[in-house]
Image: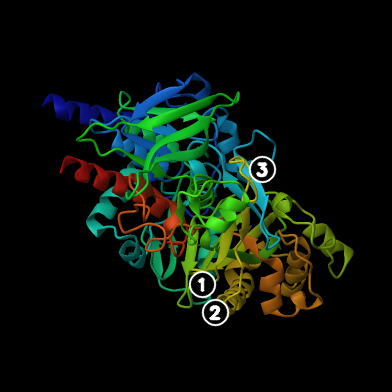
C-alpha cells in the first residue's frame, strides 16, 4: 500500500474510532441525521485563528502605502481582500469594529438574539431606528453581518448573476471557495422538521431536500453554525489570505477618502484618512508606480458605503455643502434607492420544551414569498414599545404568551422589495448612523405579497404537522392578537391590525436586516463596480444591489467579494 493510501486508511479509521473529534467536519458536511434526534451543543470555545496580520489601528504608522485599500472587513471585504492578497499586491483592510474571536461566546448559536440586540457602546452590533419607526442593526466587527445574522446560507437566483454581471462559472467557483471554509449542513431539528412538513402540507412544493440552490418549493439549506453551535464567519475566509501581503487594522474608523484633482481631469482617489481607538490620525495612500493599478474599494456595507461616499464629497451637492463638506462630485443618486426586506410573522408559544433552532428550512412559493422560522429564543429583545402588553382571551393564555423560551417565530418576507427609500447624512461623524428610510410597503405589490404570505403562515400554523406544538386552547386569532402587541417596531397600532391582514403587515413590520441599495449599478457604479465619474475607486457590497438576492443575501455578497477580487487581479495582469 502506497504512503498516500496508507494515510487515507488511517484517517478513515480515526474517523470511525473518534466520530466526535471536533477537528473533522465530515458530519456537518454530509451525514444525515434522524428526524427525531435531539441536537445538543458543546459549550467549548471555538479556537481562534492565529492571524499575525490583524492588529489594532493604534499600531498603524501615520503614513503608509498600499496597492489596494479595502474599507470594511465585512461580508464582502474579507473574501475580496483575501483574494487580492494572493498575488504580488499589498492589501490594507480597515475595519471599524473589533475581532469576532475576542469573545467567541457572543457568537455562539444560543446567544444570537442577545448579541444582535446588544446596543452597548462596544458591542459588535450598532442599533438604529429608521424613519419608518422600525429598529435595525448594522455590524461593526470583522466579518460584518455574518457575525450577527441568523446564519442561514443559500445561493442567489440566476437573475441576480445577470444583474450583478458575474459569470456563472466564476460565481460557482466563488460559492464553493466560501462553502469549503465556513458553511455546514445542519442537523435535523424538531421544530425545523415540523415547519418543513407544514410548508409541504399547505402546498409550498416541491420538496427539494438539502440544497444551496434557490428553488421554488421547500428545502433545507446551509448554515454558518457547526454541529457544536459555533459560528463561522467571513472573517474565517482570511485564512485564504497571503499573510505577507495583507494588513488588517481593527477599530479603524475611516473619516474620508481623499482625491487628487487636476484641471480638466476626473478626480482620482489616492488615499484614506482613518482614526484609531485613541483618536490617532492616520493616512494610507495608494502606490503610484507607473505600471500600478492601485485602487480604493469601498466594502462598508449598504449603509456604510453610501455614507462614506458622501463624507468624502461624492453625493448630492446641496446637501453636502449644507454640512460643510467639499464637493468632489455632484452625484444625486448616492443614497437613493435604499431598501430592506420587510419581515412579518406569527409568534407561536408551545407547551413543552424542545431544542432551540435557527432557520435551516426555507419555503419559496410561486407568489415570491419566503418562509423561515426559529424557536427556543427569548424574543422579547426584538419587541418594540409601540403596543400594549399581550392581551389574550383568558389568564391561562396570557401565561402561555409570556413564556420567553417555549415559543417560535414563523416569518415571511417577499422578493425584492419594490418599495424604495433613501439614506442621508445627519452629520459628518463617520461613527454615527445616517438618516434612513425604507418606505416598507409603499408599493402596493409588496403589501399584496405580504398579505398572501401571512395567509400561508396561518395555514402552516393550522397544519397537522404543527398541531403537536400548539396549545389547544390558543386560536390563530389569539396568536395574531399577541403578535400585534409584541411587534418589534415603534409604530402605533391601528385598531384594525388584528382583523385586517393589510393593516397587520403595516403595523407589525420588522427588518429582515437585508439592507441594499444606495450605490446601485448603472446609477452610482458601472458594471465593473467602478464609481462613475471617478478613477481608482470601486464599491463592492450590497449597496450596489437593486434587490436582495436569494432568501438570505450573505452567500451572494461573499461570492461577489471573491469573484470581483479575481476579476480585478485578472485586469491587473493585462
The residue at 62%/52% (across/down) is 322
Q: Is residue 97 left or right of residue 382?
A: left
Nearer the observer, disc 1 or disc 3? 1
Vertical order, 39 against 493 (above or below): above
Report x, y in % for residue 484.
75, 67
Tell me how many marks there are. 3
Q: Which sits in the foreground, 362 or 9?
A: 362
* Dot placed on the residue nearer the N-terminal end, 3 or 2: 3
Q: Return the mark for residue 34.
A: none
* Dot placed on the residue nearer the N-terminal end, 1 or 2: 1
10 Å neighbourhood of mark 1: few (<14), some, or many (≥20)? many
* Dot placed on the residue nearer the N-terminal end, 1 or 3: 3
CB-based contact (under 8 Å), mark 1 and mark 2: yes
Q: Which residue is mark 1?
A: 418
The residue at 30%/44% (across/down) is 565
Q: Tell me if I can see residue 490 in this picture.
A: yes
**Separation of marks 1 and 2 at Cα, in angstroms:** 8 Å
Amino acid at each position: 500500500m502506497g504512503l498516500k493510501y496508507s494515510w487515507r486508511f488511517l484517517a478513515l479509521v480515526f474517523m470511525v474510532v473518534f466520530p466526535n473529534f471536533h477537528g473533522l467536519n465530515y458530519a456537518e458536511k454530509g451525514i444525515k441525521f434522524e428526524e427525531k434526534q435531539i441536537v445538543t451543543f458543546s459549550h467549548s470555545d471555538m479556537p481562534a485563528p492565529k492571524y499575525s496580520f490583524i492588529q489594532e489601528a493604534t499600531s498603524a504608522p501615520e503614513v503608509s502605502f498600499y496597492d489596494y485599500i479595502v474599507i470594511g472587513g465585512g461580508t464582502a471585504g474579507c473574501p475580496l481582500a483575501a483574494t487580492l492578497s494572493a498575488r504580488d499586491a499589498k492589501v490594507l483592510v480597515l475595519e471599524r469594529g473589533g475581532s469576532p474571536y475576542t469573545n467567541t461566546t457572543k457568537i455562539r448559536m444560543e446567544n444570537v438574539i442577545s448579541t444582535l440586540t446588544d446596543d452597548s457602546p462596544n458591542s459588535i452590533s450598532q442599533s438604529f431606528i429608521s424613519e419608518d419607526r422600525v429598529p435595525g442593526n448594522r455590524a461593526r466587527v470583522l466579518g460584518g453581518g455574518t457575525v450577527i445574522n441568523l446564519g442561514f446560507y443559500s445561493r442567489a437566483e440566476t437573475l441576480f448573476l445577470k444583474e450583478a454581471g458575474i459569470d456563472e462559472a466564476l460565481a460557482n467557483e466563488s460559492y464553493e471557495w466560501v462553502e469549503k471554509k465556513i458553511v455546514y449542513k445542519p442537523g435535523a431539528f424538531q421544530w425545523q422538521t415540523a415547519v418543513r412538513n407544514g410548508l409541504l402540507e399547505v402546498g409550498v412544493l416541491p420538496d427539494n431536500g438539502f440544497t444551496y440552490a434557490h428553488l421554488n418549493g421547500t428545502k433545507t439549506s446551509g448554515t454558518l453554525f457547526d454541529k457544536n453551535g459555533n459560528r463561522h464567519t467571513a472573517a474565517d475566509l482570511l485564512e485564504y489570505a497571503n499573510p505577507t501581503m495583507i494588513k488588517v487594522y481593527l477599530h479603524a474608523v475611516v473619516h474620508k477618502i481623499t482625491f487628487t484633482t487636476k484641471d480638466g481631469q476626473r478626480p482620482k482617489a489616492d488615499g484614506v484618512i482613518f482614526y484609531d481607538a485613541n483618536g490617532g490620525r492616520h493616512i494610507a495612500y495608494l502606490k503610484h508606480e507607473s505600471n500600478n493599478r492601485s485602487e480604493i474599494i469601498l466594502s462598508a456595507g449598504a449603509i456604510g458605503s453610501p455614507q462614506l461616499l458622501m463624507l468624502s464629497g461624492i453625493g448630492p451637492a446641496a446637501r453636502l455643502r449644507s454640512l460643510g463638506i467639499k464637493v468632489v462630485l455632484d452625484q444625486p443618486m448616492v443614497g437613493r434607492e435604499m431598501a430592506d426586506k420587510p419581515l412579518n410573522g406569527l409568534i407561536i408559544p408551545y407547551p413543552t420544551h424542545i431544542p432551540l433552532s435557527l432557520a435551516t428550512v426555507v419555503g419559496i412559493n410561486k407568489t415570491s414569498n419566503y418562509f423561515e422560522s426559529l424557536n427556543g429564543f427569548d424574543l422579547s429583545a426584538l419587541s418594540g414599545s409601540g403596543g400594549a402588553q399581550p392581551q389574550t382571551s383568558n389568564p391561562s393564555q396570557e401565561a402561555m404568551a409570556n413564556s420567553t423560551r417555549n415559543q417560535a417565530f414563523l416569518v415571511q418576507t417577499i422578493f425584492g422589495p419594490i418599495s424604495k427609500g433613501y439614506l442621508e447624512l445627519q452629520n459628518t461623524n463617520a461613527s454615527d448612523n445616517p438618516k434612513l428610510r425604507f418606505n416598507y410597503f409603499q408599493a402596493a405589490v409588496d403589501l399584496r405579497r405580504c398579505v398572501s404570505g401571512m395567509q400561508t403562515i396561518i395555514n402552516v400554523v393550522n397544519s397537522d404537522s404543527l398541531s403537536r406544538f400548539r396549545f389547544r386552547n390558543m386560536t390563530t386569532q389569539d396568536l395574531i392578537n399577541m403578535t400585534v402587541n409584541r411587534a418589534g417596531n415603534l409604530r402605533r397600532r391601528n385598531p384594525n391590525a388584528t382583523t385586517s391582514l393589510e393593516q397587520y403587515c403595516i403595523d407589525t413590520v420588522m427588518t429582515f436586516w437585508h439592507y441594499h441599495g444606495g450605490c446601485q449599478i448603472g446609477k452610482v457604479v458601472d458594471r465593473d463596480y467602478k464609481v462613475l465619474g471617478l478613477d481608482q475607486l470601486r464599491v463592492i457590497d450590497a449597496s450596489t444591489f437593486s434587490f436582495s438576492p436569494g432568501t438570505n443575501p450573505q452567500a451572494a455578497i461573499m461570492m461577489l467579494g471573491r469573484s470581483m477580487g479575481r476579476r480585478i487581479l485578472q485586469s491587473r495582469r493585462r
